[in-house]
Image (spheres, coloured by chain):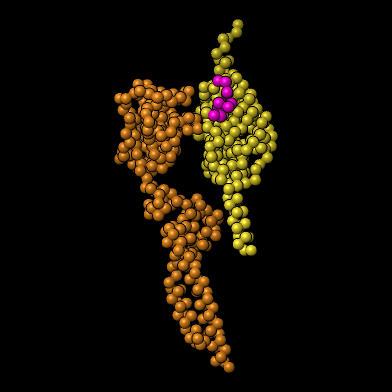
Chain colours: A orange, B yellow
Amino acid sequence: MSLRNSLIFSVRWHRRIGLLCALLVLVLSVTGILLNHTSSLKLGSIKIHSAIIANLYGLPSPEPVSIAIKEQWVSHDGFQQLYLQDKAIAQCAAPLLGAAQHHGLLHILCKDVLLLLSQEGELLEAITPVLGLPANLQTLTQHKDQLLLKTTTGVLNANLDTLQWLPSNETSVQWPTLQAVPPQLSQAVNTEAPAIDLEQLLLDLHSGRLFGSVGVLIMDMAAVLLIVLSITGFIAWYSSKQLRKGKRR
Amino acid sequence: MYLKTLTRLFILAGLLLLAPGIWAKGIYMTADQFLQNTFPKTQPEPQVIWLNAELKATISTFLYRPYRGLRVRYWQHQNRSAWIFDEIGKERPITIGVVVNDQQVETVKILAFRESRGGEVRHSFFTNQFQGITLTEKNKLSQIIDGVTGATLSVNAVKRATQLALFLRMEALKQQALKEQSVEPAKD
């Protein structure tokens, strides 16, 4: 290939490839610059609540639920936060399984933890499987002055003073039902999409991982195209330099 | 030649991945087993120590976080008391059992370790260092605990749990003494 042809070829492909990967290079450069200053920009502490982004991460949408205890509502935002009426009181991992008042205390059962709270919602104690909380719990209620726990295999009578969980023969027990958050509390109970760190988002955008394995392949392609760009750029520069040299002679 | 070197490298990488301490997750002892070992003859019923705002504030100075809850369970028989806490190393809670005899640490056991690194703290070469330790006036451990390379956060979690057990034991003794005083009939 003559120098002129090689110049035309490389410039033509340089333009085409440049145009093709312009957007990807823009994404790579901007995210790269921001990631270089993660600490100073405190990207890790910036939280983004977006249903679309949460969807890209495969995170489920929150399903807030409430349980009525006498005249009060115990609600859970579907992630971590518990509410008594409109007041955030404690945290426990979803799902909320049940809530009951027993001996003047609020007993709230979440996944793998039984929280004991005062009437005002102050946390007294968290009873976890470490302290003997049985497995496979489904819900709890107060029945005839007993605290009953429903498991997949039967009903247990809980004695929280001695941390004993004895089988119970009670059959006509009314278990609490989970309901949608009542309208008057829907403002207070947080139903935002799960938070994603901006740093994590930028990292996954930079690597393409945000869009799964296809995204990674596209970013790989962008990187390969950048290498090709540098080669075509070099060939174009070298060919035009040689051509100018030849003309001068 | 190259094949041999490559095979060796693969074996080395495999051994490193399987090295203890790197993948150290596991439950080593249930709370029941811990209590059974501590009180082999008669397992005492759990007792409760109540925390007021002042105690919670003091606890937060050495836990470096606010303590959630107003009461703590423990088991006691004569001078020996057993405490079980979940303390976070880096991201996941480590379940730590501490036995306090009078006001000295008798044993420290790691009941469950859920972090991906730092599981070396479960070994006796580390936990034995706590034997005989007391709490100073400034609520610090009376002896220096040697760290474990690569397990600094887990080491700190075990130290915090031990401090908490010793502190609460001291408070439980105070609360028991106050209770006995109030029950005792007034002397003429």
Establish if A121 lies above or below B185: below
- Is A131 located above or below residue B180 in the figure? below
Q: Position of residue B138 (x, y in %)?
A: 65, 32
Quarter where residue B117 is shown: top right
Q: Where A60 sits versus A165, above or below? A: below
Residue at image point 60% right, 54% down: B11
Please state the horizontal and vertical placement of residue A103, each as a whole percent of the image. Answer: 41, 23
- Locate residue B145 relative to residue B183 in the image: left or right: right
In the rendered image, residue B49, in percent from the top left (x then y), is placed at 53, 25
Specify whether residue A118 is in view: yes
Q: Give residue A75's position: percent from left, percent from top.
A: 37, 37
Q: Closest to the observer: B10 or A210?
A: B10
Per the picture, the main secondary structure of the magenta-coloured stretch is helix
Query: What number of labels is visible?
Result: 0
Q: Is residue B169 magenta?
A: no
Q: Nearer the viewer, residue A47 or B86?
A: B86
Is residue A218 left or right of B117 when viewed as pictured?
Answer: left
Q: Nearer the viewer, residue A63 or A69?
A: A63
Q: Residue at x 62, y 27 (%)?
A: B100
> Quadrant of the image for the C terminus of chain A?
bottom right
Could one spot residue B136 in this view of the protein? Answer: no
Q: Residue at x 60, y 8 (%)?
A: B187
* Range of residues picked out in magenta: B33-42
Report which quarter residue A209 is drawn in: bottom left
Which residue does the image show at 32% across and 39% down from the upper left? A181
